[in-house]
Image: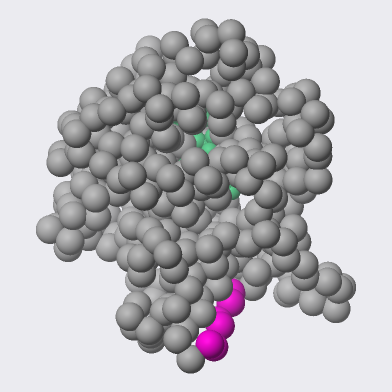
Amino acid sequence: MTRSITILGATGSIGASTLDLVRRNPDEWQVEALTANCSALELARLAREFGAKLAVVGDETCLDDLRTALAETDIEAAGGAQALRDAAARPVDMTVAAIVGCAGLGPVMAAVERGGTIALANKEALVSAGEVLTAAVAKHGATLLPTDSEHNAIFQCLVGNDLQEVARITLTASGGPLRTWSTEQLKAATPEQAVAHPNWSMGAKISVDSATMMNKGLEFIEAHYLFPVGLERLRIVVHPQSVIHSMVEYRDRSTLAQLGPSDMRVPIASCLAWPKRMETPLDPLDLADIGELTFFAPDEERFPATRIAREAIHAGGSAPAILNAANEIAVAAFLEGQIGFMGITAVVEDTLARSSAASPRTLEDVLAIDAEARRSAQQSLGSKALV
Ligand code: NDP
C-alpha cells in the first residue's frame, strides 16, 4: 500500500538518506512535500524526481529561484517560516523532521498538532522545547519515532519492556574526530578538522557538535524527554567504533544493545517501516572484521559540553533552550572562523551564566527564549576572553 511522506530538510544529509530509501521503494511512497532553506535548485530537482506536490524554501528570498526552477510543472512552490509550518501541517502518513536547528521547531510542532507520525532527527527542536513538545505529542495523539541513531537504538531495545524496569540507559558517543587531541591542539582545531568525522557523514553543524561532544550533550537532553527514566539513569560512554548505537540495562542486570553499520539509513529505515522492517542496501555487520569494540569514560576536562548540557537539563526551565541557541550561534561563528574550537563551549557556558527566563509554556515562549539567547550569545562572541 502506498504511504504519503513529507520530508522537512530534504536537501540535507538526513534528507538525502531518507530519499535514497524512498527511491529504492518507489511503489511504497507518495511524496507530499519537500522543504529546504535556500537550496532552491536542488529542492526543485528533488521535487521533480519524486513527483512532490509541494516544495517549500524557508528563506523567502529564495522563492523566486524555486518558482523559476519549477516552472512548467504542477508542483506548488512556497516560501517562508509559515509556509514550512503549513507544509508540515498537511496530512501525511509520515513526516521526516530533518531541518537542522531550532528553525525546525515550528514545523515539527505543526506536524505534532495534527497528530502525525514523525520521524524526528531534528534533536534541537526537542532540546529547546522538551516539555512543550512532549505535552503537545500527548495532547494531540502524535507519534514521535526517534531517528537519531542512539535514540533509535534505545527505542528498539525498549520494545516489549516497561520503562519502570530500566536500571540504566547508556548513550554511546564516537568521541568525534578530535577525541585524542590535547587541549593545546584543540585550541587550534580548524573547521575542516572538526567536521572530518571518522565514522559518520553528516551536515556541518552536527559534525562540529560531534567534535565538541555537544552532540552527546544534546542527545542526553533528548533522551531525557523521549525516555523519562530519570536523569540519574542516563549515562554516556565513548565507543570510537560506533558499532553499538546505545544500550538499555534492566534491573535484572540484563543489557540490550543495538548494533549496526554507521549509516543513518539504518535508523531511518527503522522509522519508515515501523513497526515492521524494510530492506536497506547496506552490507551485513562483520564483527570479525571490526575485531574490537572499545569503551572509555568521557573526558569532560577537554570536552566540557556534556557537563554543560547535564547541568542545563538539571537546571531545567529555559536552560536547555538557551544552551541550544547559544550552541547554534557559537558553531556558526566557529565555522566562519570568528572563534576558536574551545570558544564554542565557552560561549555556551557564558550565555547560560548570563541568561535567565521563566520556564516556557508555549511554542511562542520557547521561540522568544531562543531569540533572546541568540542575542546574548552574539554578545559573548564579541567578548575578547572567549575569542
Ligand atoms: P544538513 O545541514 O545536512 O541539512 C539541513 C537541512 O535543513 C537542509 O535541507 C537545509 O536546507 C535545511 N535548513 C537549514 N536551515 C534551515 C532553516 N533556517 N529553515 C528551514 N530549513 C533549514 O543537516 P543534517 O541532515 O546533518 O541534520 C539534520 C538534523 O538531523 C539535525 O538536527 C541533526 O542534528 C539531526 N541528525 C543528523 C544526523 C546525520 O547523520 N546527518 C544524525 C542524527 C541526527 P538548505 O539545503 O537549503 O540549507
The image position of residue 384, as x and y in percent, is 58, 8
Q: Residue at x 86, y 73 (%)?
A: 291
Find the residue positioned furthest to the left: 139
Q: Is residue 3 visible?
A: no
**Marker count (numbered):** 0
Residue range of the region highlighted in magenta in the rendering: 253-258
| Viewer-closest of 48 and 296 | 296
Question: In this rendering, would 126 be left or right of 327?
Answer: left
Q: Residue at x 81, y 39 (%)?
A: 181
Q: Is residue 257 magenta?
A: yes
Magenta-highlighted stretch: main secondary structure?
strand
Q: Please state, as top left, top right, bottom left or bottom right, where the C terminus lies in the image.
A: top right
Q: Is residue 249 magenta?
A: no
Q: Is residue 120 visible?
A: yes
Question: In this rendering, would 23 be left or right of 32?
Answer: right
The image position of residue 319, as x and y in percent, is 34, 37
Find the residue positioned furthest to the bottom: 252
In the rendered view, tell whether residue 233 sits above or below residue 90: below
Question: In this rendering, would 347 be left or right of 118?
Answer: right
Q: Residue at x 21, y 47 (%)?
A: 132
- Which quadrant of the view contains residue 255? bottom right
Q: Please state, as top left, top right, bottom left or bottom right, where the N terminus lies in the image.
A: bottom left
In the rendered view, tell whether residue 359 sits above or below residue 275: above
Question: In this rendering, would 68 be left or right of 94?
Answer: right
The image position of residue 9, as x and y in percent, is 44, 38
The image position of residue 349, as x and y in percent, is 48, 30
In the rendered view, tell whether residue 329 sits above or below residue 47: above
| Viewer-closest of 287 and 251 | 251
Coloured how? one colour
Q: Residue at x 67, y 59 (%)?
A: 297
